[in-house]
Amino acid sequence: MAIQHAAETPAPEGHPFLWLLLLAGGTLVAALLGAAHRLGLFHRLAHKVDKTSVRHGGEKVAAVLRAHGVRLVFTLVGGHISPLLVACEKLGIRVVDTRHEVTAVFAADAVARLTGTVGVAAVTAGPGLTNTVTAVKNAQVAQSPVLLLGGAASTLLQKRGALQAIDQMSLFRPLCKFCASVRRVRDIVPTLRAAIAAAQSGTPGPVFVELPLDVLYPYHMVEKEMVPAKLPKGLVGRVVVWYLQNCLANLFVGAWEPQPEGPLPLDIPQASLQQVQRCVEILSRAKRPLVLLGSQALLPPVHADKLRAAMESLGVPCFLGGMARGLLGRNHPLHIRQNRGAALKKADVVILAGAVCDFRLSYGRVLSRKSKIIVVNRNRHDMLLNSDIFWKPQEAVQGDVGSFMLKLAEGLRGQTWAPDWAEELREADRQKEQTFREKAAVQVAQHLNPVRVLQRVEETLPDNALLVVDGGDFVATAAYLVQPRGPLRWLDPGAFGTLGVGAGFALGAKLCRPDAEVWCLFGDGAFGYSLIEFDTFIRHKIPVMALVGNDAGWTQISREQVPRLGSNVACGLAYTDYHKAAMGLGAKGFMLSRDNEDQVVKVLRDGQQQCQEGHPVVVNILIGRTDFRDGSISV
C-alpha cells in the first residue's frame, strides 16, 4: 500500500524542468570535457612544453634507430626529412644518399635480407615517396622487413594544398604491414618501436611511418611558421591564434621526457611439438624424400650455419631457392640443382620449407598426387596457395621454417636413406650439366656465347663473392650456371620479378659485407635502371663489380613475342657502350666481345683487381642469342 501511495503522489511542480536543466548541464559539461581532451588541455596539466629547447624530433628518430642496432640509413635528401638525417649522422649512423628513391629502398631491402634486422630508408614527401612504391611492393612480396620513413607536410597544412602534400597513408596501406602518421613529438618513439617490431614479426614485411614537418623540426622553427608574430586585433583573429598556439603546445608537450627506445619482443610463430612429431613419422617412412628450401628458411632466429648443419644431419636431397641459394656451399652432394620438375614427380615425400606453390612451382601442378606433401610457412595464405585446386598437403605447419627444420632433423637423428635416390638425382644433374657444356661450345651468330661467358664467370668467381642479379634472359641463364659460394651470398628480386634492383642491392650488400666482393650480373635492359647509381658508388667509395650481358634487347620477351606474334616491336635496344657511360661517372670500364674472346678470364681478373683497389667496375659483355632458354616463362 505504501508503494502504491507513493506512486500516486503527484510530482512537484517544475520537476520536468529541473531534469531538463540537469541533462542540459551534464551534456554541456561532457562536451566541454571532450573538447578539452581533444585540445590536449588535460595532458598539458601533467606534462610541460619546453619552449626554450633546441632539440627536434629527428633526434628521437635517430635514437630509436641506434637502440635497434641500425647502422645505415639510405635516402635521397629533401627538406621534409633533413632533421632526422642530421641527427642520424650525429649519432654515428651512416647516411647514404642515392640518385633515386627506389634505390634507397632496394638498398634497405638488401640490408634487411643479409643482416636479419630491419633495413631503413628515409625519403621526402610526395614524389619522394611515390618513387619508392615499386621497391616497397617488392619488399612486401619478398617478405623483407624494411622501415620506410617518409616526410609529410605540417599537420595543420595537410589537405590544404601544401607543397607535395598527398594522402600518403592510403598509398602505402595496401603495401605495408604497419602504417602510422606521427602527430606529436612524444609519439615518435613508441610508433617507431611498434613499426620495427611489426616489420620483423610473423611474416616479415615493409612498414611505413609518416613524419610531418612540424614533428621533426625544433619548437622555435615550428612556432615561427605556425603562429603569427603580431597578435591580431579582432576576436576571430585572437581565437585563431589561440587555436594555433594550442596546436603547437600539443605537438611538443612532454616531448623530451625519457622513454624506452629499445626493441620490443617479436612474435614469431612456431610449429607445435605434435606437428613436428607427425612430420617426423611421415618422413621416417619415406624412400625418396625431397626438400625444397625457400627464402623464409634463412630468417632469424635460426642462423644459417645451424640450418646447414641440420640439413646435413637430415641427409635429404634438396633444391635451394631465393635467399636459401648457397646454403650448402658449392657442389654439396645433397644440393640438387637441375631437373626439379622430374625429381618432384618421383619423390614420395616432399617438404615445401618456405617454398610456395605459385608460378614457380606451376601453381602446385608439378607435385605428384601420389606424394605426401609437408608444407611449412610463416604465412598461412602462402602455405595453402592453390591447395584447393592442384595439390593437397598431408601436413600444413604454420611456423618459422628454420626452427622447424632444426626440430625435424633432431627428431630424425640417426635416420638414413638409401643412397640410390640421391645418386639418381645427382646423375640427372650431371647429364644436364653436360648439355650446358655442349651449348657453351656452340658458336653464336655474333659476339660471345653467353653460356660460355657465364661458365668463365663461375670459374673466376672468388669464394668470398656475394652475387647480385638483376635482369631477364642473361640472369636466368646465370641461375643455372653460376653458384653462390655460401649462405646469404645471392640476392635476386624475389617472386615479384622486379627489374632495377641491382644498384640498390649492391649498395646495401657491400656496406653490410665490406669484406665480400660484390659481383652484379645485369641484363642490358635492367642495367639502364642502375647506371646512374655508379655516381653513388663513386661518391661513397663503394667498389662493386658489374657484368652486363649486352645482347641489345629485351631478349626474354623477344624470345616468345617474335615466334608467337611475328614482331619484335619494343624489344630492341642497342649495343650501347655501357662501360664508357660508367667511366664518365668515374668508374672503371672494360669491354668483352668476339675481338677479345680469348681474354674473358683475363678481363674479369683485371676488373676484379680494380675493384679490390677500391674502384667500381663495369664490364660490358657483348653477347649473341642462343636457344638455352627457349620456352622459358616471361609472363
Image: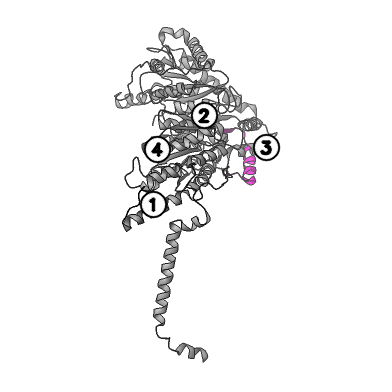
Stretch in magenta: 269-291
Mark drawn on residue 340: 2
Tag 1 secondary structure: helix
Residue extending farthest to the right is 414
Q: CA distance from mark 1 to mark 4?
A: 28 Å
> Which of disc 4 and disc 3 is earlier in sequence?
4
Res. 13 in view = yes
Instruction: Single out the mark in the foreground, 4 or 2.
Output: 4
- Dot 3 corresponds to which residue? 410
- Dot 1 corresponds to which residue? 244
Q: Is residue 547 above or below residue 117?
A: above
Q: Nearer the viewer, residue 484 or 205?
A: 205
Q: Residues within 10 Å of mark 3 (few under 14, many from 20)?
A: some
**What residue is drawn where x is 35% and y is 55%?**
238
- Dot 4 corresponds to which residue? 129
271 part of magenta stretch: yes
Q: Nearer the viewer, residue 543 or 473?
A: 543
Instruction: Single out the mark in the foreground, 1 or 4.
Output: 1
Q: Where's residue 156, x and y in %? A: 38, 48
Answer left or right for 569 relative to 612. Answer: left
Circles 3 and 2, Cβ within 8 Å, touching? The answer is: no
Q: Where's residue 426, x and y in %? A: 58, 23
Q: Where's residue 239, x and y in %? A: 36, 57
> Which of disc 2 and disc 3 is earlier in sequence?
2
Q: Amino acid at mark 2?
A: Arg
> Which of disc 2 and disc 1 is earlier in sequence?
1
